[in-house]
Image (tube, rainbow, N blue to C red):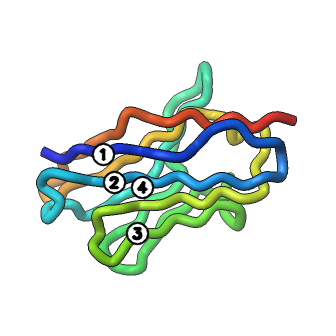
């Protein structure tokens, strides 16, 4: 089992920046991929960005060039730096990880609201 706890988020004006953090605990040695998804009201949950155990990352086109994902050396934390935020970035942001056996785990979510 893996537990994910997010922090950060909040309210920001368009063009501003926010940072999200996510800490993993439990069976952390079995984590391969960590990342972020988001879900806006009335929409499906969508990928924002993921990072593997090496330097590989996968970033959604909608946030490429504005958002940066990173992991710490111990691979127990994942961060999302969000710059040049737009109102359409408003959503609940969920931390995600996948174990080496393919099991997925989710955090409780944190609200990001971008005002115009």
Label number found at residue 78: none
Left or right relative to 78: residue 114: right
Q: Residue at x 50, y 57 (%)?
A: 49
Q: Residue at x 21, y 60 (%)?
A: 31
Q: Which residue lies furthest to the right in this view?
A: 116
Comes first in the chain, label 2 or label 4: 2
Q: Are marks 4 and 3 in contact (CB under 8 Å)?
A: no
Residue of label 4: 35
Q: What element carries label 1?
A: strand
List x then y, in percent, for residue 56.
42, 75
Q: Do the residues labelled 2 and 1 touch (CB within 8 Å)?
A: yes
Indicate which label's residue lies in the foreground, 2 or 4.
2
| Cα gap from disc 2 to disc 3, whole angstroms | 10 Å
| Cα gap from disc 2 to disc 1, whole angstroms | 6 Å
Could you classify mark 1 by the number of other residues whose Cα lies within 10 Å: few (under 14), some (14-19), or many (20 or more)? many
Comes first in the chain, label 2 or label 3: 2
Residue of label 3: 71
| Cα gap from disc 4 to disc 1, whole angstroms | 11 Å
Residue of label 1: 4
Q: Which residue is drawn at 19% across and 56% down?
A: 99
Residue of label 2: 23
Quadrant housing the N terminus: top left
């Amino acid at each position: 089992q893996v537990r994910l706890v997010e922090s950060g988020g909040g309210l920001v004006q368009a063009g501003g920046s926010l940072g999200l953090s996510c800490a993993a605990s439990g069976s952390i040695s079995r984590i391969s991929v960590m990342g972020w998804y988001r879900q806006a009201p009335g929409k499906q949950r969508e990928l924002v960005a993921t990072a593997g155990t090496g330097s590989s990352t996968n970033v959604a086109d909608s946030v490429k060039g504005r958002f940066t994902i990173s992991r710490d050396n111990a691979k127990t934390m994942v961060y999302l730096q969000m710059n040049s935020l737009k109102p359409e970035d408003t959503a609940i942001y969920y931390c995600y990880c996948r174990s080496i056996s393919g099991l997925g785990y989710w955090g409780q979510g944190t609200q990001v609201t971008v005002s115009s």
